[in-house]
């Protein structure tokens, strides 16, 4: 029985448990309304199919099966199916089974908008979910707002929190770039160097990195020596490395797309052993094995991870259950194909977002589209999510105004071709005051 499961174990003291004391300086712990316990104890399994309609809750899964996001899309789909299976085995959503309806958007903004419309008008889904790449989020979200269908993205761009979208769009279970950089920048500039060169993809997600890393440098008395934007479809990168100023103390890189392995290899060939410090976002290595030929030079460099790829990086009970459910081994590869490395620092967002939708469905009493307003208002009333099987990456704070969460981050050092966690931030480290209030918009 799930109610007999033990509470998650912590590898280090958990500084990220949500509380009003830690975030707002008051004395009352946030332990009730709006903060969702997710250790899969008795309250989680309170529903059974008999308690609800036989009709499934249909969730349109906007998946990057093709295009530059295909590596992520494959693992997003695998995680989504595993989460839906787990939820269905434990009572479904509000006593109803979950049905995932996938459509490939080609990692293309225009096609993404068409997919959203197809979900709403042809498939007649209850919700749309799963988009990662920020330019696709930007291209798809307006259509979701026009169609008035809840749209849950699993991206990292700042677009949701910026107020640029609409009241129907949520990013509840994966942090945005602004929060990530805010959380880690002090450690980076204090430990790696004050003169930084930025390397980032030439589209909205990359611009988030450019802008917030630049702001963080100013805050910490550091200097951005150069800003190098690279097209996400680029296949050769040496000419960009030649533009890095010689006085650079730390290179900050984030790269996506089919050329990521070539990018990292060519960076090693360019610098050899005479390199500055290097801090990368795991996006540059998602789906890539660290022992791949040509990556030896990464030993001694640092990476951001949202969720540690290696099992010993954050060995909680919830993480173990999640890792097993998605079929990933202790090294972050598929148990069925050891050469197939997961996108572990992103795909957890799919798992967690489906559980967040489940909570909103059950707390709002959602039955059908006539209940959209109540479901959205219920979601906006959430304050956060407690760590557990439903939220294995860690506790989250959630802002109903900005429709965005805040959570912990990890900094890992590559040693012997393996990521080893050297620092874990708190939720507070990445918190910023919301700059928008979607709750003021009409439904």
Image (spheres, rainbow, N blue to C red):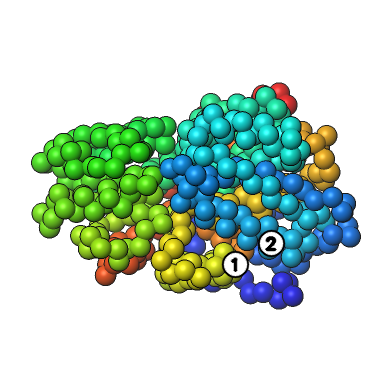
Q: Quadrant of residue 103?
A: top right
Residue 277 % position (x, y): 20, 52
Q: Residue at x 42, y 32 (%)?
A: 204
Q: In the displayed structure, would residue 278 be above or below residue 50?
A: above
Q: Residue at x 88, y 57 (%)?
A: 51
Q: Quadrant of residue 160?
A: top right
Residue 235 % position (x, y): 29, 42
Secondary structure state at the residue bearing disc 1: helix
| Quadrant showing the N terminus | bottom right
Q: In the displayed structure, would residue 428 be above or below residue 78?
A: above
Q: Is residue 279 left or right of residue 170?
A: left
Q: Residue at x 33, y 49 (%)?
A: 260
Q: In the displayed structure, would residue 301 be above or below residue 61?
A: below
Q: Residue at x 50, y 71 (%)?
A: 335
| Quadrant showing the C terminus | top right
Q: Are marks 1 and 2 in contact (CB under 8 Å)?
A: yes
Q: Is residue 97 left or right of residue 84?
A: right
Secondary structure state at the residue bearing disc 2: helix
Q: In the displayed structure, would residue 172 be above or below residue 87?
A: above
Labelled disc at residue 325? 1
Q: Quadrant of residue 3?
A: bottom right
Q: How many marks?
A: 2
Q: Is residue 159 left or right of residue 412?
A: right
How crowded is the residue under tag 2: few (<14 C-alpha within 10 Å), some, or many (20+)?
Answer: some
First along the sequence among labels 1 and 2: 2
Labelled disc at residue 192? none
Residue 227 % position (x, y): 25, 33
- Label 1 vs label 2: CA separation? 9 Å
Q: Is residue 183 visible?
A: yes
117 and 350: which one is in front? 117
Labelled disc at residue 85? 2
């Amino acid at each position: 029985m799930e109610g007999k499961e033990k509470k998650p174990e912590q590898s280090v003291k958990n500084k990220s448990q949500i509380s009003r004391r830690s975030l707002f300086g008051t004395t009352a712990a946030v332990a009730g309304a709006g903060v969702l316990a997710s250790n899969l104890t008795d309250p989680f399994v309170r529903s059974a199919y008999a308690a609800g309609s036989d009709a499934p809750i249909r969730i349109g899964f906007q998946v990057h099966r093709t295009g530059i996001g295909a590596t992520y899309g494959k693992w997003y789909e695998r995680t989504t199916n595993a989460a839906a299976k787990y939820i269905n085995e434990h009572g479904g959503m509000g006593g109803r089974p979950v049905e995932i309806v996938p459509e490939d958007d080609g990692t293309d903004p225009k096609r993404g908008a068409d997919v959203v419309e197809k979900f709403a008008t042809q498939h007649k889904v209850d919700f749309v979910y799963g988009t990662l790449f920020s330019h696709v989020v930007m291209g798809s979200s307006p259509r979701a707002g026009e169609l008035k269908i809840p749209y849950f993205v699993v991206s990292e761009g700042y677009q949701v929190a910026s107020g640029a979208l609409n009241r129907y769009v949520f990013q509840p279970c994966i942090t945005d770039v602004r929060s990530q950089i805010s959380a880690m920048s002090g450690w980076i500039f204090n430990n790696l160097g004050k003169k930084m060169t930025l390397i980032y993809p030439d589209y909205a997600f990359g611009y988030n990195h450019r802008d917030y890393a630049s702001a963080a440098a100013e805050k910490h008395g550091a200097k951005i020596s150069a800003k190098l934007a690279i097209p996400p479809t680029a296949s050769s990168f040496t000419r960009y490395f030649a533009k890095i100023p010689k006085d650079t103390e730390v290179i900050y890189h984030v790269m996506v797309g089919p050329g990521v392995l070539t990018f990292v290899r060519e960076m090693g060939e360019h610098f050899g052993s005479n390199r500055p410090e290097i801090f990368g976002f795991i996006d540059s290595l998602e789906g890539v094995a660290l022992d791949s030929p040509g990556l030896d030079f990464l030993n001694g460099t640092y990476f951001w991870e949202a969720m540690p790829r290696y099992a010993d990086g954050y060995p909680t009970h919830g993480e173990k259950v999640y890792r097993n459910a998605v079929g990933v081994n202790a090294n972050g590869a598929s148990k069925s194909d050891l050469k197939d490395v997961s996108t572990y620092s992103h795909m957890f967002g799919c798992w967690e977002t489906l559980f967040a939708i489940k909570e909103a469905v059950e707390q709002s009493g959602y039955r059908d589209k006539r209940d959209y307003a109540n479901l959205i208002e219920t979601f906006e009333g959430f304050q956060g999510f407690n760590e557990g099987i439903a939220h294995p990456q860690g506790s989250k704070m959630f802002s109903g105004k900005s429709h965005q969460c805040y959570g912990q981050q990890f900094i890992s050092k590559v040693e012997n071709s393996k990521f080893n966690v050297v620092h874990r931030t708190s939720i507070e480290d990445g918190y910023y005051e919301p700059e928008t209030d979607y709750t003021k918009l009409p439904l």
